[in-house]
Amino acid sequence: MAGSGRLALGTLPLSGWVRGSGPAVLSRLRDAAVVRPGFLSAAEEETLSRELEPELRRRRYEYDHWDAAIHGFRETEKSRWSEASRAILQRVQAAAFSPGQTLLSPVHVLDLEPRGYIKPHVDSIKFCGATIAGLSLLSPSVMRLVHTQEPGEWLELLLEPGSLYILRGSARYDFSHEILRDEESFFGERRVPRGRRISVICRSLPEGMGPGERGQPPPAC
């Protein structure tokens, strides 16, 4: 059932959902790597999960992504949504994107099996613009960002079911990001057991790309 993987962390302050290697990186990415826990109600999470399940069930899990970034996944791109789901996605757009940003259509949907994971990668600027925003469904997970030139600088995001994460600018282009595999899934000393995880990812349009153009979707988280 959607929401069954929620951690008992509802009393944590917002700062409790993000941890980093030090004050400098936390300050640098304060507005570039954002987590909004509880963005979805349990009912809204259930609405999205039920709508996506028939399409995902028709696909098999794969183990060799086109650029070797994802293991144990299935994905789709979805343009047609129910009225209830469209309302949720409009909330995501309002929360994560500036009024001048145009979003790519369709929305990218990524389904990781319980032992699936996403390897460290930096998104290509050819396939999406400066901002991505993802809803996490079904299972908690940990996203880790590591500076591409200074690996001692890192940030970790705790993504509960129903949470929204937003990556902008430097967080996307100067840092790699990944979803930790189950055996590595810790947030500090806290174990974050991984189950099946679905992410629903909205992306801004790359510079120079028209709204009707499409490219291979990036290995978004």
Image (cartoon, helix red, strand yellow):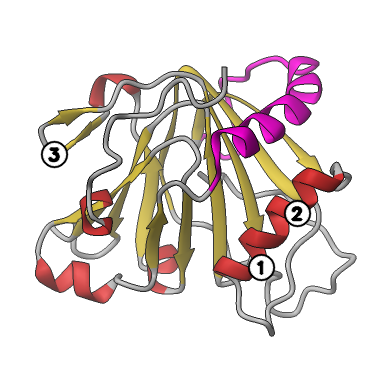
Most distant residue in the bottom direction: 100
Amino acid type, residue under disc 2 in the picture: Ala
Q: Residue at position x 76%, y 45% from top?
A: 85
Q: Residue at position x 51%, y 32% from top?
A: 70
For label 1, the crowd category at 10 Å Cα-Cα, with few meaning under 14, some 14 to 19 and many 20 or more, is: many
Pointer 2 residue: 87
Q: Nearer the viewer, residue 198 or 220?
A: 198
Dot label at residue 204: 1
Pointer 3 residue: 188
Instruction: Answer whether residue 127 is visible to the viewer in this image.
Output: no
Q: Where residue 143 appears, x then y in whole percent? A: 35, 44
What is the secondary structure assignment of the residue under circle 2? helix
- Magenta region, residue range: 40-68
Q: Where residue 122 appears, x then y in whole percent? A: 45, 56
Location of residue 130 by image quarter: bottom right
Residue 162 within the magenta-colored segment of the rendering: no
